[in-house]
Structures are given as structure tokens and as C-alpha cells.
Image (tube, rainbow, N blue to C red):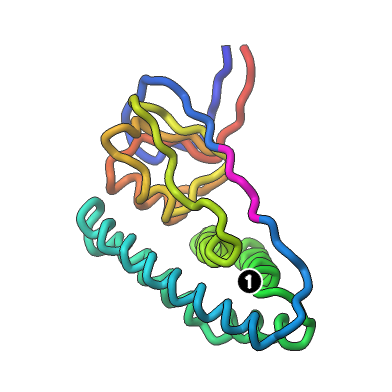
Amino acid sequence: MIVATGKSILKGIAIGKIRFLAKKQAEIKDTAADPAVEMKRYEDAKALATEQLQGLYDKAVVEAGEDHAAIFEIHMMMLDDDDYNESIAEIIKSQGKSAEYAVKTTGDNFAETFASMDDEYMKARAADVRDISTRVVNILTGADIGPADSDEPFIIVAEDLAPSETVQLDKSKLLGFVTRLGSTNSHTAILARNMNIPALIGTEINEE
């Protein structure tokens, strides 16, 4: 028998079939010939990401309430952050890198900075900056960012779930989720609690 132990973010029991969610990594090209073209690609991808986040905000208002939907307003603000955008532009223009490489590198650097902070709330923001960066990279590379689908109720088991992925899941089929990573202060945990989704995060899996 396999037993997973971790932190519960909502009292409740979920019984059902397990669906493992393996995320595909986007293929990222390194260098690019024309920085101006890459900057235009980034600006277009950023605009589409903002549009998608607005849609997620509208959906979250209905499912989790306006206060918790504000998570996606924060994500839109992160996309407009001067330091974030200046870092991306610097990598594209000075290093001759592709837009997707610049976004991923910047996202990783910012996430590491948040994760190294002592404050638990700020540590949890690492997942948010990774979420928005992954969204932009997926747009730039054409990667599939759709939610998991199933014809029957299921429990998701994944390495981690981003807030945007949590909101997009079909609540009529989702019984709960288990992730290896995550914290009780993460926006994913906050959303799950307010959407009444039983979840276990920061888990360790053992066989008994």
C-alpha cells in the first residue's frame, strides 16, 4: 500500500481514482537573431497572458469570491512589474537571447529570490512568479496549457499545481489533489480552501 503524508489545507475526505498529472516542459530555444522581433514577440505574449489572467479572475470571482480572485490581479501586476520587464528586455537586447529564454530565466531568478526570503508569505510568492512566467513561455512556444480532463471523478496527484491550473480544473469532476510541493500560504492552497477542494500538499510518499 502507498501512503502519502503531508499538510492538509481543508478538512474532508476524498475517495476516488487517481490521475497523475505530468507537465510537459516547453522547448526553449536559446539565441535569436533579431532582438526587436523578440521584444515584439514578448509584448504580444504578455498582452495575451494578461487577457487570459483577466478571464481567470472573472472565473475565480464566481467560484472563490472577489477577495481570493484578487490573486490573478496580483499576477497581472507582476507582469507589469518594472524590474521583471527590464530583466527580460536586458536579456533579449544585450545577450541576444530568445523571448522565451529571457522570460524563463527571469522567472527562475525572481522565484529563487522569493524562495530564499525568511518570511513565509514572501517565500510562497515564488510559485506565483513561476506561474506567470510559465504562462508567457507557453504562449511563446505554443505549448499546451489546458487543464486536465476526465470523464469520471478523479483525484489529481502532481509535483505541484499553480493557482491558474487550480482554477481551470473541472470542479464537477475534481475530488481533491495531492502535490509533493507547495505550502499552506500559497495562493493555490488559499484558492483550494475557498473552493472547498480537499488537498494534501508538501507530501512524502511511502510504501507500507
The structure residue drawn at horizontal position 43% and vertical position 35%, both measured from the top left corner, is 177
Residue 55 appears left or right of 8: left
Query: From this viewpoint, is residue 113 visible?
Result: no
Say what amino acid the circle numbered 1 marks: Val
- Residue range in magenta is 22-26
Figure check: 137 above or below 148 = below
Which quarter of the figure is the C terminus placed in?
A: top right
- Name the spot of residue 135 as percent of width and height, x first: 51, 62
Left or right of 60? Residue 93 is right
Residue 120 appears left or right of 197: right
Point 54% across, 28% down: residue: 5
Residue 91, quarter of picture: bottom right
The answer to whether residue 129 is above or below residue 149 is below
Q: What's the residue at 31%, 63% (across, down)?
A: 55
Q: Nearer the viewer, residue 197 or 172?
A: 172
Dominant secondary-structure state across the stretch colored magenta: loop
Q: Can residue 148 be seen in this view?
A: yes
Q: Name the residue under label 1.
A: 103
**Quarter of the image with the N terminus in it:** top right
Q: Does the magenta stretch include residue 185?
A: no
* Residue 86, position as x, y percentages in the image: 62, 86
Q: Which of 98 and 9 is in front in this view?
A: 98
Above or below: residue 109 compared with residue 36: above
Give the camera-side residue of 17 and 3.
Answer: 17
User: For numbered disc 1, what is the local secondary structure?
Assistant: helix
Q: Residues within 10 Å of mark 1 (few under 14, many from 20)?
A: many
